[in-house]
Image (cartoon, helix red, strand yellow):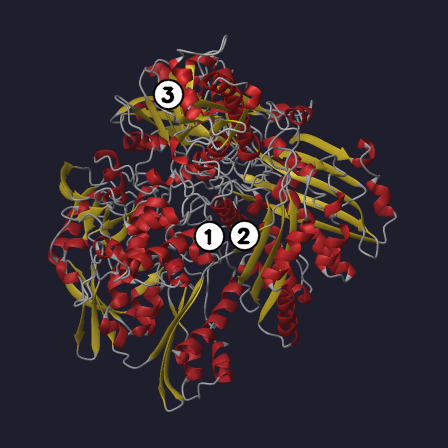
Amino acid sequence: MTSTAEPEVGRARLRKEDARLITGRTRWTDNMSLPGMVHLAVLRSTEAHAKIVSIDTSAAKEMPGVIAVLTGDDLDPGGQLGMPCAWPISPDMKSPRRPVLAQGQVNFAGEGVAVVVARSAAEAEDALASIDVEYDELPVVLGMENALAEDAPLVHEELGTNRNALWVFDSGEAGSGGDVEQAISEAEVVVKRRFRQQRLVPAFMEPRSCVVDPTAAQLTMWSATQVPHILKTMAALTLGIPEHKLRVIAPDVGGGFGGKIAVLPEEIMALLVAQKLGKPVKWTESRSESMVAAHHGRDQIQDLTIAARRDGTVTGLKVELLADMGAYLGLVGPGVPILGAFMFNAIYKIPAYHFACTNVFTNTTLTDAYRGAGRPEATFGIERIMDELAAELGMEPLELREKNWIKHEEFPYTTVSTLTYDSGNYEAATEKAKQLFDYDGLRREQRERRERGDPVQLGIGISTFTEMCGLAPSRVLGSLDYGAGGWEHSAIRMLPTGKVEVITGSSAHGQGHETAWSQIVSDQLGIPFEDIEVLHGDTQSSHKGLDTYGSRSLAVGGIAVVKAAEKVVAKAKPLAAHMMECSEDDLEFAGGKFTVRGTDKSTTIQDVAFAAFMAHDLPEGMEPSLDAEAVFDPENFSFPHGTHLCAAEVDTETGRVALRSYVCVDDVGSVVNPLIVEGQIHGGLAQGIAQALFEEAVHDESGTLTSGTFADYLLPSAADLPSFTTDRTETPSTTNPLGVKGVGEAGTIASTPAVVNAVIDAVRHFGVNDIEMPLTPMRVWQAIRTGASAAGGPGAEAGGGLGSIDSAQGGAR
Amino acid sequence: MIPAPFDYVAPSTVDEAVRALVDAGEDAKVIAGGQSLLPVLRMRLAAPTTLVDLGRIAELRGVREDGDALVIGSMTTHYDVQRDPLIGEHAALLARATDTVADPQVRHRGTFGGSIAHADPAGDLLAPALALDAEMLVAGPAGRRTVPAADFFDDFFTTAMSPEEILVEVRVPKHTGWHAHYEKFNRVAQAWSMVAVAATVRTEGGTIAEARVGLTNMASVPVRARGVEQALVGQAATPETIRAAAEHAAEGTNPTVDGNADVEYRQQLARVLTGRAISAAMAG
Amino acid sequence: MRITVTVDGTSYTDDVEPRTLLVHHLRERLGKVGTVVGCDTSNCGACTVHLDGHSVKSCSVLAVQADGCEVTTVEGLARDGTLHPVQQAFHDNHALQCGFCTPGMIMQSIDLLADNPDPDEQAVREGIEGNLCRCTGYQNIVRAVQDAAHHMRPGAGPEAERVAGVDQATGSRAASSVGGGGE
């Protein structure tokens, strides 16, 4: 590479990761097979809430191939072990113990009750049916308002309440704004709405899996996890394993979306069983198991009140949330809705703001992070109610937004929720989106269709969003009582032959870090892209890190890489000067070469690395290495933003929604790899649209998950989604040297309200002002017919999936 | 998930298959394409002691002409039905309905007869078979017998066949030159039908001479929309007459309620989709 | 039961339990772990392989049903170190992120192109409707399949001639052979 070469950062590099993934040479955890390995299968509770009267494992123990059948009491006789929650959001938060396997009581359908250890996975599964559990049913607590009712039965009797925690932010008290009650009482216009964020399943494609090898020098666990470093520390703490005796490896991981930010009971089980038996152990879940046992996401009831003047100036926003935790607290579950506290005010200048969130226990699968985690919920709430306010005022919804958003010349801007947005240009993104969308043309067509009473009505949905990414400045996490910092680590190894190994604490599972980090290092060190290998996901090689979630990898982990590279150059410089017999001050470094200023005398960093390796002739006192590491703690969040426009056609005779066009212009700051950025946006859009139209985790009145397979939990296929028009504006972040902001969650956060707003806009003239998600054809049709918001009802259930397969008539098709 | 253990036999003739079923007793099960059965076995919603696989019986595959009818072997795959020139010419309705079954991989394995015998009211081939007055030839220990489609479907997943009988072939009267369309409504592409309408129409001049309309998932069995058929016959095929006829579509239906649709909504869909199916048939 | 299955060009004879699914036979007995399991209900398509030239979900086929058959998996597509055009197109168009659905997507895309060598966008979308992806939103997958179609078109150059396999005279086809897949 020469100094005139095109920079790597910004290039649409094809991914390094692909080679193994497109040829099947993958290392999924379930591919792992070790000598003498035994298999685990977990018996899961069929009851949502019950006392366990007895568990009879004797017959199962006699089944072929069975080595052991263990209950919670077998694994943890003292009842001491509890799965960790790392985010106690308030000092008085109620935190029930979550055992590895249920002890005495089950609290959701799907909770582990016993584990079979057998020679094969099939034999382990066979033995499950022979375990006899006697339950004594307890009243099932479902629905957050039911759970909070005066005389409600309790999920955890010993807590005395189903209320997990209350978390409040008030701009009047914080001094960041006015008093919201006053704003509401003095307002010319007040709009109140209740929105429901249905429960979702993250539905990563690779089911979770772990393998534990107790015969290795360190107790070694492979796991399909997003968080190998957190898992290592938490598992060590939970089980009292000395941390230096445990190694965690996240090999190829097939998606996460927040759903693999967890420390699993099954991982703890596998560690316990492997140590007990002295044999390698594997657990791989089935999809059906994953649906009930892996954590869910979202599930909020949002009560919003917005106050404004007649001219559209927003004067106050009050947000009251109920958030369903499920039966226990996940690793960061209680904090997920709290992340939304900072985002309801979104891109708007809102002078008074109040946020209160009540977390609630119910007898359901626990909830925790799912792509966006708290921010999609907030964005949905504010972008929906902005449309409702516009309708109330008779204003064009884009104009209302423009009237209230932060102008580009007003950055940096400190919001009513106390965040300082460093940069942004909402005008530019919106203008570009309008052009690409043909906003005016579609509005015209909408009018025409409405006037002629076309059975297919057209609606336009807007979502002008921002998000807080780059989780997170450690001091901010500290102020939120989060159980860790928000830094990230990187190290660079300069190998003798001029090649480079980059170590990162970010743990990718589809994001393309190997490619993007190579691009960054290539520019920083002037090393060819191909000569760089990125190592991650193994606590032995990548010993330090806080992993991948919250669109943090590039904005935090990527910056750590830059910092490490800067240290390498700084270490190389004295040696280069020594080699060329000049003063360090005369050297400049560019394109991988140290050049003596004003001469053509130069040496490459590879030559310097070799000289350091040989160490025959180093400057006085220099250690023989250019290797360096860095830990980066961001000073601020980053704030990607964008304008998403959706045109939806609604078939008024059937209620079916078809997306006619979807345009988004995102500003994710500077871009390392536009191909990867575009891919992240596409995938994010699909998930956000799926929340709007297709997906919902539904429990029946007994607490059984009725959408428990991919036949019932409707993930959209290619045939169910349109092509998206994506574009970007680039307003660099000013708080990191790359100017990057993060892109992993943008599409998901922005798209859900854009779609729902479009559908409501298409049918508002029928008197409809809300339809509950997912916007099933029946709900849309009913809303049109009754001219009202169609909530819940039979559409809130799953069904239809496997035909009517549960009648078990079998046969063939 | 892994099915519970079972014995497996793969006979090479129909007689052997019947004998295998008799020998294996009441917990035996026939596997045709297996595309509905294997997920059921994996989920352990069923645990037959023996599977009798019809996949190696050559006699059960293929489509042939027999006078004024087509004869479709029960083990003919959906993929082959979709592409069969005889079916395209004489029973286009079946081809169009088969196009919508599940997804391409499932259509490669799944079979016409398996789908009929499974008798899931949400299955897409039952209503067309009913609308076309198909006849099922079944073989059992007492020999072979023919059952008209109208008498074949008894209830959810229940047919006139006894557990020891297998479906050999389906005889479909030729509907040469008829217009046909299958209008399917579901929430995502690979899902089962919430409601679907099978419509096929013969015109003379500009007038509808004959019409056959079958409804999918509007009761525990496929339903013939006789009111619609009667309203169409003798009419000019205008949007108005089609719309008026389609208003009869939900008459006498008794659809189930599930998460995706209640009775009222399914009946609405039946009416709307019937109109669309007939219009599309005429246009095609 | 003793079965013989040819997988990616190699014949294997094994004793299997009748209940063994083809995908488990491939993964656990034959070490063909490139083919993966993503669900229990045959919805996700991650396990798609070719069975006698047609795409099937190997979680919905018993190993005993594959006795005497030829199976092609994603591991059998590349020849002499050269990627199949569909594999190449997935790479070139960034049609994968986590890559878990990718083996099934690629196998189904090859099947689709065998039936329809020049699919429009809608035909591609419907052709892969039995394969779920959670990462990509499908847009780049659709682009990749159309790109591959372009490269596999007769006359597209020496690269494509390698894989031309449709018997024009009879119209018969074998998906894997069209794709140059190891049978």
The disc, 1 or 3, on the residue closer to the chain's N-terminal end is 3
Between A646 and A57, the one nearer to me in the picture? A646
The answer to whether dots 1 and 3 both sit on one chain is yes
Q: Decide if residue A97 is in sight here.
A: no
Residue B66: image x %, image y %?
Answer: 17, 76
Categorize mark 2 by other alpha carbons within 10 Å: few (<14), some (14-19), many (20+).
many
Residue under pointer 3: A496
Q: State the mark number for residue A716.
A: 1
Q: Are marks 2 and 1 in contact (CB under 8 Å)?
A: yes
Q: Secondary structure at mark 2?
A: helix
Name the residue type under label 3: Pro
Between A258 and B154, the one nearer to me in the picture? A258
Residue A287: image x %, image y %?
Answer: 40, 40
**Marks 3, 2: nearer the viewer:** 3
Q: Decide if residue C146 is in sight here.
A: yes
Does residue B80 sit above or below A4 in this rendering?
below
Side of B238 where B172 appears, left or right:
left
Task: Write the residue at 41% across / 43% down.
Answer: A14
Q: CA distance from mark 3 to mark 2?
A: 50 Å
Task: Write the residue at 40% across / 80% down.
Answer: B282
Between A687 and A278, the one nearer to me in the picture? A687
Q: Are marks 3 and 2 in contact (CB under 8 Å)?
A: no
Residue A526: image x %, image y %?
Answer: 46, 32
Q: CA distance from mark 2 to mark 1?
A: 9 Å
Residue under pointer 2: A689
